[in-house]
Amino acid sequence: MTAFHAADRVWPHSTGKGVVVAVIDSGVRSTHEDLLGHVLPGKDFSTGGDGRTDRDPDGHGTAMASLIAGQGHGPNHSEGIEGLAPGAEIMPLAVDSTGTSNLDPRGIPDAVLYATDHGAQVISMSLGSPASDAALAQAIAYAEARNVVVVASSGNEGGDRLDWPAAYPGVVSVGAADRNGALWADSNTGAQLTLTAPGVRVVGAASSSDSAYAIADGTSDATAYVAATVALVRSAFPHLTAGQVINRMIKSAINPDRVTHDIKYGYGIVRPDAALTFNIPPGPASGPLPQETSAPSSESSAPPSNLTPTRSTTQQTSVWLYAGLGAAVVVLGLGGAAIAWRRTRLL
């Protein structure tokens, strides 16, 4: 929040109030002390619950929700995690049925449709697969046609192509940078990359208890920050279309390579303060990105076999002293063999 100049340059203009962000992930621990009162009933597409339980032992969905709309706790919210858009509300849409770092992909298109039909203005997906899926492409086209901004992570393989759904037209695809603005080594790159955001050594809420925290790297975290920025802009400029919101974010980003667009940073590192304050013409209603209109004909309509995160961790447990936090930080790992669908996480 210091790097974003949130307290003095962002929150005086917008906190994301009135905006619902759908987090399609493993569910969200709504009782976490930093999220109380800001997690709406959603849906668990595996169990039929309301999504307010995190089914990932790593707490991936809880972490993403906290980076977007965490409230902190204690005197003047001085402890814990305060998200970039603390006025926003989270709609948790759980698609994890395995209880591991793998995600069941079958619920993802349905989750996109549910979010669109139940008032979400932003859909955040910190997950990805190297394979496309016709049903998901159609769901994203449905969301985009109904003025919803879809944000997804580029992937954590350090490869030269984006994961799906980040690679679909119209999706705000997100890579990760470190605290110095350098591209994170494992951030996927490619011509479709839209924006980059902080994604190295990021602290978020965890799901093992109501006061648990974890530290990790990954394009997952970067995606959460970009989704939060969308919430900030949508709250401040409610008359703008989804495409015009994306236009503000693109036009206000800063590219360390001093180019308009490249495969490493996309249009640049997101700057929420600039997105809120720069004098940027709205531009066309459709925005600067091409739009998804139908499922790719070259890909199978069958969903990939599994899904994984884009926030990776190594196996260890430690106590990490952080300004105003002083919490026990549980760092959990993905482990195991390569998997086709993944949430985007790494320490």
Image: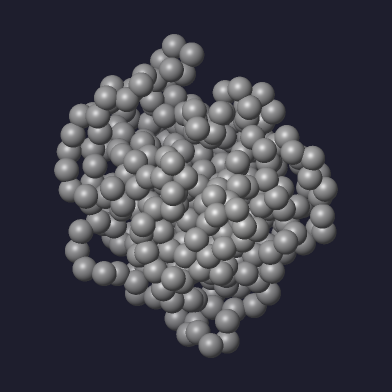
Q: Is residue 1 visible?
A: yes
- In front here: 202 or 327? 202
Q: Residue at x 35, y 47 (%)?
A: 217
What sort of colour scheme is used for the picture? one colour
Q: In the shown orientation, is residue 11 left or right of residue 344?
A: right
- Tell me: residue 2, above or below residue 180: above
Which is nearer the eye, 269 or 343? 269
Indicate the position of residue 75 as horizontal and vertical percent values: 44, 11
Is 204 rendered above or below residue 167? above
Vertical arrangement, residue 194 with respect to residue 67, above or below: below
Q: Which residue is rendered at x = 69% and y = 69% of the image?
A: 290
* Residue occupying the point 53% across, 65% down: 263
Visible in this render: residue 92? no
Q: Residue 116: percent from the left, percent from the top?
A: 63, 56
What residue occupies the far front of the structure in this picture?
258
Q: Residue at 25% across / 56% down in the picture?
A: 334
Q: Is residue 98 left or right of residue 194?
A: left
Q: Quadrant of residue 262?
A: bottom right
Q: Position of residue 296 (x, y in %)?
A: 58, 81
